Amino acid sequence: MLATLPAALLLFFGWWSGTFPGGATALGGAAGHLALLLVALFVGAAWSDPLRLGPKGRFLPIALWVMVGLSCLVSPVPRAGRLGVVLLPAFLFVPAVVERCWRTPEARRRGLVAVAVVVITVALRGLLDRPLFDAPRAAMPLGHHNLLAGFLVALLPLVLLNLRERGAARVLSGIAAALSVGAIAFSGSLLAAVALAVQVVLFVLWRVGWHRLLLPTALLVLALQMPRLAAIVSGHDASSAARMVYLDAGWRGLTLRPLLGWGPGSVPWTLAEFLRPIPGINPPSEVVGDLHSLPMQILYELGVLGFVCTLGTAAFFLRRRITERGEAEDSGALAAGLIGLLGAAVTRLGGASLTVTALPLTVAVAAGCALSARPRVGGEATRRPSRFGLAYVSVALFVLMPVDLAAWHYDRAADRAAAGADADATTELEAAHRLDPSFPAYSARLGPRVEGPAGAALAREAAENAVSVSALWLACGDREADEGSPWAREAMLRAARLDPLGALGPFHAMELAPANAEAAELGARALLGEPRLLAATFWREHADLRAAAVAEVQKMDDVDAGWREALARAAAAQPSPLASSAWIGLEMDGDPALSVSLHVFRRTPWRWTLAPVEVDAGLAEEITLPAAVRLPKPATL
């Protein structure tokens, strides 16, 4: 049974607890934390050198963990990295646990058969996305096509190992490989296709006998990506253009905190400060959960010191395993583990979603496979949990229990709110905030439900704890305005600065100070982001300001002349005091792909309309002009 433990972990994380949607639920997140900590108890005496780096390298993982802790300590958003600090040792222990589970050839064969079954299950679910669920790409159960491809790329060399066996193990290995390659192809992930080609080259260099079967397959998958590659080279690929915006933002942030970075997990909470979105490439109010490049993300979050420790640990592990090639009891397992790691590294050049824990787990299992090729001496003595392991798990549980319990109350609050039980939802949110007071999502949700200045204080607390999340500053400004606070306009201006393509921040900032010299310019920005705001009932008492805002738009030479003319024609109709009203606001979790809760805070989406603006319903329906900031180039109307 111990031989199947790594596969059980992969299935548990790859199907539910470590996926993009499943890991955001309280039950999924807590179950994943508990599973990792229980597995950490199996590391035994190997905790002092879980990656078997030897006397010269054994302190590198410790140095990495220390750097992660220091970076979290000096971070402006320390709460964002708390789970990373606590769980990093558990992930570092997984390779040693896999090594223990696969110490013998028979145990490794059984374990790899179980891994093949997991890969078949995951890949088959991904392949069913298009025919049964009408999805454009294979993405489930991981929740995103790049995540699915990265999961399968890391495990493909492992499942291929059993092609050298006979009988059912060989058949399962072949099926797993075929389905895995098919799912990668239908995921449309360019980097995964490149990773496959890299893995084939590495297999050839290692002189694996069946490389002739792999090379045509990898080339076929790569050929399917040629249209995308051509679009990237010609500069017509929107995804690549957006990634360049993220990398530029990451570099800007790194230059300000080069040594220890902004802290683990800080990207979604701080990146907006450095983001320079491009109209037509980046949507208004875009939620950026990661930098789409793991090297840049590590540099941004951990700084140069953390990056050096990370790279040093990986390089030393690779060097140590290569030097063991001549002494390995199973050179195939060593090759499969290392090639799986290098394939995963290629896919992470274009993805950095470490909060989706299924991905780092596959890396840990591949590393464990490489370790199992030459099990450490005295491995039988590691059966009993060490005192260090027990102490670590105890401390980790003490830190994680209030975090996971708060997430459970949050999910209950979302369920109560959906059922219309607002009083119960408020009670659950209060419990979540009490258990985890520095987590912005809880105080942000609680603020609108608490009357008086206390509610405004909660909204401001959420915005300040998250530092640079535009949606929370918008919610803060709206709540402060309800209380007549002088800080309301400042919060709206902050939201407008963090979301330069958004409409509601500048509109409300203008609304709160219509006599200000910047009011017309702010109104113009709002109209560029949402032309239907021409129908706002606010203009009934401020017709001159409305005209001035439209005039400001007419002066903008970088906006298409046809679009400006269309806006001027739409502005000829004024909001009527007799018309029925409607509301235009920012749907914080309206689109799961752009969910603040899911991407920024890794919590279950909970729809919330932020800072709504009252409009003339009939006039708003007549304005069909697209937002100027969504146009990739000057519009022709």
Image (tube, rainbow, N blue to C red):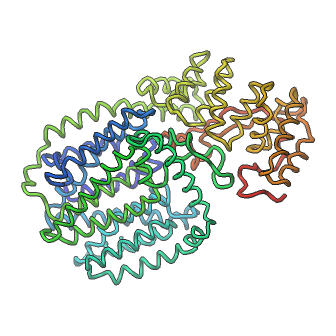
Asked whether the viewer can see residue 47, the reply is: yes
Asked whether the viewer can see residue 113, the reply is: no
Q: Residue at x 89, y 31 (%)?
A: 544
Can you name the residue that lies furthest to the bottom here?
Answer: 212
Q: Position of residue 287 (x, y in %)?
A: 57, 45
Viewer-closest of 426 and 542: 542
Q: Position of residue 401 (x, y in %)?
A: 34, 32
Viewer-closest of 102 and 502: 502
* Left or right: 510 in relation to 44: right
Q: Position of residue 619 (x, y in %)?
A: 86, 41
* Left or right: 73 in relation to 145: left
* Left or right: 136 in relation to 351: right
Q: Is residue 293 above or below residue 440?
A: below
Viewer-closest of 500 and 159: 500
Viewer-closest of 546 and 299: 299
Q: Is residue 375 above or below residue 166?
A: above
Q: Position of residue 247 (x, y in %)?
A: 51, 52
Q: Residue at x 11, y 49 (%)?
A: 382
Quadrant where the C terminus sits is bottom right
* Quarter of the image where one finds residue 518: top right
Q: Is residue 378 above or below residue 186?
A: above
* Left or right: 414 in relation to 285: left
Can you name the residue that lies furthest to the right here?
Answer: 572
* Quarter of the image where one finds residue 11: bottom left
Quadrant where the N terminus sits is bottom left
Count the marks: 0
